[in-house]
Image: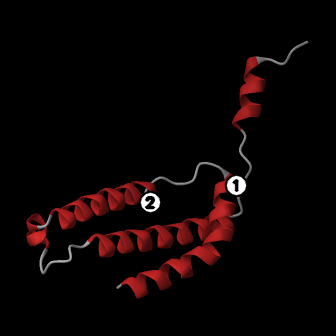
Amino acid sequence: MPPRMEERAEATLERPQVPFLIRAAGLILRAIFLCTLIAIAIRVSAPQSETIWSAYETPGDLLRLVLGAVVAIGILVQLFRPPKDAQAYRTWAYLGIFLTPLAVVVAFAAW
């Protein structure tokens, strides 16, 4: 006899549990990494002129400013979207150990 629909639905809805420490580390390292990327995008896209209002004088500065704002907004949107599965938390926890300090060093070097 085939299993009932409720049993199949319950079987597909079960998610593997992520340990709290890995979940917290993944979220924290991901947040630090993405915030650092936003800071780098803002710094790199800043106009070469004196003020932000003089960006309209040079088309290159205006284009850099608009592209930087789009990238920063895109990263900001990703910051508020949590990972969807357990493997994503593990990936951020393990890769974040290496990527987050690297991003922070690059941000200090760019500033």
Numbered mark located on residue 96 in the image: none
Q: Earlier in the sequence, mark 1 or mark 2?
A: 2
Looking at the picture, does residue 65 appear above or below residue 13? Answer: below
Figure quadrant of residue 37: bottom left
Numbered mark located on residue 87 in the image: 1
Figure quadrant of residue 102: bottom right
Which residue does the image show at 62% across and 64% down from the upper left?
92
Which residue does the image show at 64% across and 56% down from the upper left?
88
Figure quadrant of residue 6: top right
Residue 75 percent location from the top left of the image: 41, 59
Residue 107 percent location from the top left of the image: 42, 81
- Identify which amino acid the numbered label 2 is placed on: Leu
Considering depth in this image, is 75 or 90 the residue closer to the camera? Answer: 75
Residue 29 percent location from the top left of the image: 56, 72
Q: Is residue 86 left or right of residue 72?
A: right
Q: Quadrant where the C terminus lies? A: bottom left
Give the SS element for disc 1: helix
Considering depth in this image, is 32 or 63 the residue closer to the camera? Answer: 63
User: Which residue is disc 2 drawn over?
Assistant: 79
Q: Is residue 12 left or right of residue 65?
A: right
